[in-house]
Image: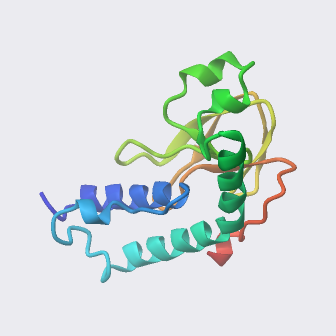
């Protein structure tokens, strides 16, 4: 049914994903009417605000990788095997990606999912939401409640993001 909880969860997951792309899109325009009460529901407003702030904070980073794309032909959104060609496991991954060299994004794809198993390539990675450090290569399972897309920052990255509590 239009306007049911499934549509709201889907919209929130789309907002998470959209903020971690070069151009932020939330897919709201693809929906009939206003099935998620986007502008009146506190949860949707808070989610949009959070991810708009995160996307805005990424502006210098995204601009830098737009220059790389122009000069070297490397895409901003990348399959992991592009940066980690020696890791066989990266070639089979279809549900996570790198945003530039330093951000690893693992969108939540199943309704009701509250955690996510992610492949981390051979580097150190900080889970954005908790600050916990992980060493790759290998798989980890992290919390992924609604409103918190699994996002990792490569160790040593020259990237400043707002603290999650400041979003």
Where is residue 7 drawn, in percent x and y?
26, 58
Q: In percent of the image, x 58 and y 49: which residue is there?
A: 150
In the picture as drawn, the residue positioned furthest to the left comes out as 1
Where is residue 82 drawn, in percent x and y?
67, 30
In the picture as drawn, the residue positioned furthest to the bottom comes out as 40
Residue 140 in the figure: left or right of residue 20: right
Where is residue 149 drawn, in percent x and y?
54, 54
Q: In percent of the image, x 69 and y 56: which residue is there?
A: 128
Q: In percent of the image, x 63 and y 24: which residue is there?
A: 90
| Quarter of the image that includes the C terminus | bottom right
Q: Is residue 102 visible?
A: yes
Whether 140 is drawn above or below 18: the answer is above
Residue 33 in the figure: left or right of residue 66: left
Quarter of the image where one finds residue 5 = bottom left
Where is residue 8 drawn, in percent x and y?
30, 62
Report the front residue among 82 and 10: 82
Quarter of the image where one finds residue 30 = bottom left
Q: In percent of the image, x 55 and y 57: which residue is there?
A: 22
In the picture as drawn, the residue positioned furthest to the front comes out as 71
Report the front residue among 5 and 49: 49
| Quarter of the image that includes the N terminus | bottom left
Quarter of the image where one finds residue 64 = bottom right
Q: Is residue 129 visible?
A: no
Coloring applied to the structure: rainbow
């Amino acid at each position: 049914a239009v306007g049911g909880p499934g549509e709201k969860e889907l919209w929130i997951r789309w907002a998470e994903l959209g903020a971690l792309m070069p151009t932020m899109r939330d897919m709201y325009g693809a929906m009939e009417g206003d099935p998620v009460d986007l502008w009146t529901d506190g949860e949707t407003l808070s989610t949009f605000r959070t991810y708009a702030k995160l996307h805005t904070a990424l502006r210098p980073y995204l601009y830098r990788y737009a220059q790389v794309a122009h000069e070297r032909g490397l895409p901003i959104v990348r399959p992991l095997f592009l940066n980690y060609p020696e890791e066989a496991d990266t070639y089979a991954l279809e549900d996570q990606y790198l945003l530039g060299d330093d951000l690893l994004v693992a969108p939540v794809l199943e309704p009701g999912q509250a955690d996510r198993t992610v492949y981390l390539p051979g580097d150190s990675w900080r889970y954005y939401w908790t600050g916990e450090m992980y060493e790759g290569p290998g798989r980890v399972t992290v919390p992924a409640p609604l409103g918190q897309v699994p996002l990792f920052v490569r160790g040593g990255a020259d990237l400043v993001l707002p603290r999650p509590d400041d979003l």
